Amino acid sequence: MKILVLGSGAREHAIVHSLNSELNAEGVPAHEIHAAPGNPGIGETATLHGIDANNPEAVVALAQEIAADLIMIGPEAPLVAGVADATRHAGFPTFGPSQEGARLEGSKAFAKEIMEAAGVPTAKPYVCTTLAHVEEAFDDFGAPYVVKDDGLAAGKGVVVTNDREAAYAHAADCFANRGQDGRVVIEEYLDGPEVSLFVVSDGATVRALAPAQDFKRVGNDDEGPNTGGMGAYSPLPWAPASLVQEVIDTIAQPTIDEMARRGTPFAGILYVGLALTSKGTRVVEFNARFGDPETQVVLARLQTPLSALLLAAAKGELADFPELQWHPQTAVTVVVASERYPDTPVTGDPIEGISAANALDGVHVLHAGTKIVDDVLVSSGGRVVSVVALGDDLDATRERVYQGVDAIGLRGSHHRTDIALKAARGEIKPATQS
Ligand code: AMP
Ligand code: GLY
């Protein structure tokens, strides 16, 4: 197939890496892969196109030029901009929800409305339009305070804190920065470990991928501000075996059914962010796309050809799709971030050691914030590369992934050293149900 992948991060590199590992009878990659805009890592196996991936007309024109058989939309921005609507309208099988579907991620208030209509368990919200209303919500819930900008904020619009003044200040900032129509969501605090579960849907049928856990805070022991994600692992040895079916039955299928009932079927990835709380499984958030960095570990373990799964979802044929197959190994990824990420990342520094890391057994490096300047690979963003390792268990895989991270040279860079550590030590437990 000719496959066009939109996006430029490690998630998209992971997708291209998986697609490229599908070989034909002659043992060579089965697909012709195009990416827009892509990144230097993606460019090693795909043709890059320097178009604006958030512009529906530009994407349709590119899809026509290359005669794409499948379009895979990686990030939320093109979805929110209506790119999937435009490419579907132009007749291209497209993986990724419509603009209306992407509101499940683009508006926290809309997501709460759908969850309520579908009877999906989630944190109780107050959708506030004034600071007085915010104070009322704080009084009702007490600490810790959970304050969310209603609109898209790349994972950084959420503050969870015991400090009421800081919580209030964030709400005031959200209003000052307009929020989404000036709305701020205050939520009940959810205790218990978090899980990311990606559910593929064609608008009616759902198929869950393997659960993963990501690490959102910048520092070890979950210290410091939220980031886009500093690492992930999959599978989760501590998660109950019944979790995936429970999420399908009580969360994913009811949500997909509610979207279909409204005449706006959701086809693509429903990313279910969960907390396994003392009161049971709760939705923390929905996203309308694969998560980054969880995709890097989930796809590393997927044995079923990714192209076939994406195409079946794009064409509404998931009901007939065979059961997904997984490598039995464990996958861990660690993100190498640039100096001063997530505040004001320093960019433009040379990156060394990617080939050395790739040469390690069971290790591969995915590019995120990289670019080539005068034939030199340099950092161009906050999250620079995502080092991925596969191994027999969490201990062995952690050792491998950190060997890979140690091989990477980037002045001033930082990474967490405790990705998957608690899980490896058996220290994570779902909060007991009451
Ligand atoms: P979100 O953008 O909604 O995923 O929030 C980002 C992160 O903030 C989540 O992954 C959680 O770690 C944390 N968070 C969000 N909502 C809550 C909540 N209601 N209770 C506790 N933590 C939360
Ligand atoms: N890993 C969090 C996200 O992709 O939103």
Image: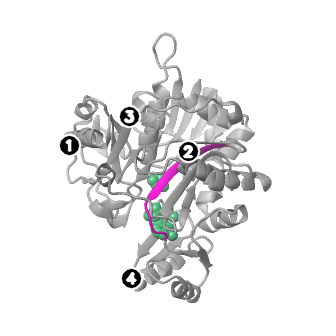
Q: Residue under circle 1? A: 406
Give the mark toward the camera: 1 or 2: 1
Check residue 283 for magenta coloring.
no
Give the mark toward the camera: 4 or 2: 4
Question: Between disc 1 and disc 2, whose residue precedes?
Answer: 2
Q: Nearer the viewer, residue 38 or 262?
A: 262
Q: Residue at 54% across / 49% down in the picture?
A: 242
Q: Residue under circle 4? A: 163
Check residue 191 for magenta coloring.
yes
Q: Residue under circle 3? A: 329
Query: Element under label 1?
Result: helix
Instruction: Kindly report the secondary structure that dominates the magenta region of the rendered protein.
Output: strand
Question: Between disc 4 and disc 1, whose residue precedes?
Answer: 4
Q: Residue at 32% across / 39% down in the picture?
A: 393
Q: Does 342 sit left or right of 431 as displayed?
A: left
Spot the residue most to the front. 434
Q: Amino acid at mark 2?
A: Ala
Q: Amino acid at mark 4?
A: Asp
Question: Between disc 3 and disc 1, whose residue precedes?
Answer: 3
Q: Nearer the viewer, residue 97 or 323?
A: 323
* Magenta-highlighted residues: 190-201
Contact, mark 1 vs mark 2 (Cβ under 8 Å): no
User: Badge 3, how many Cα within 10 Å: few under 14, some, many 20+?
Assistant: some
Residue 193 in the image: above or below residue 2: below
